[in-house]
Image (tube, rainbow, N blue to C red):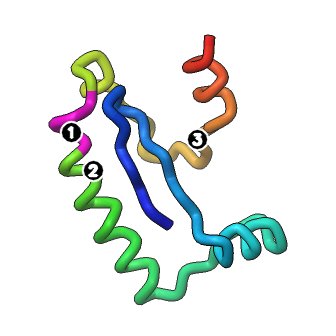
Amino acid sequence: MKFIQLKDGSCDILFADEEIEILNKTKKFNLPPEAFKHTVNEMMAVCLKWVDRMPEKYQRITSEGDQQEVHIKELTDQKLK
């Protein structure tokens, strides 16, 4: 999995063929502790870079700490309008 931030502040998440096969088969990823730690480390590094590149109107958006789902399709549909 690779995270690429675009100039408009959005992000593409690219998946390897093997990752796509796993998602298609199981509809989830199960990350063992070490893999999860590396993923979190990578996401934190990316987040720190994103803050500077994120358009100002999005920088102060907050999320509920107990929010379980991010409805990507709804957010993508909004972006396309």
> Residue 4: x, y in percent?
39, 50
Left/right of residue 31 with respect to residue 45 in the rendered view: right
Secondary structure category for the residue under label 3: loop
Residue 39 position (above or below residue 69): below
Task: Measure the C-alpha gap from mark 1 to mark 2.
Answer: 6 Å
Task: Measure the C-alpha gap from mark 2 to mark 3.
Answer: 17 Å
Q: Mark 3 points at which residue?
A: 70
Quadrant position of the C terminus in the picture: top right
Query: In the orientation shown, which residue stands out farthest toward the left?
Result: 52
> Residue 48: x, y in percent?
19, 50
Q: In this picture, which residue range is highlighted in magenta?
A: 50-54
Mark 2 and 3 residues: CB-CB less than 8 Å, in contact?
no
Left/right of residue 65 with respect to residue 22 in the rendered view: left
Q: Name the residue under label 2.
A: 47
> Residue 5: x, y in percent?
35, 43
Residue 59 position (above or below residue 41): above
> Residue 32: x, y in percent?
52, 87
Task: Measure the C-alpha gap from mark 3 to mark 1.
Answer: 19 Å
Secondary structure category for the residue under label 1: helix
The image quadrant that residue 42 belongs to is bottom left
Q: Name the residue under label 1.
A: 51
- Mark 1: few, some, or many residues within 10 Å (few <14, many ≥20)? few
The foreground one among 32 and 18 is: 18
The image quadrant that residue 7 belongs to is top left
Q: Which amino acid does label 1 sit on?
A: Val
Give the mark toward the camera: 2 or 3: 2
Q: Main secondary structure of the magenta part?
A: helix
- Mark 2: few, some, or many residues within 10 Å (few <14, many ≥20)? some
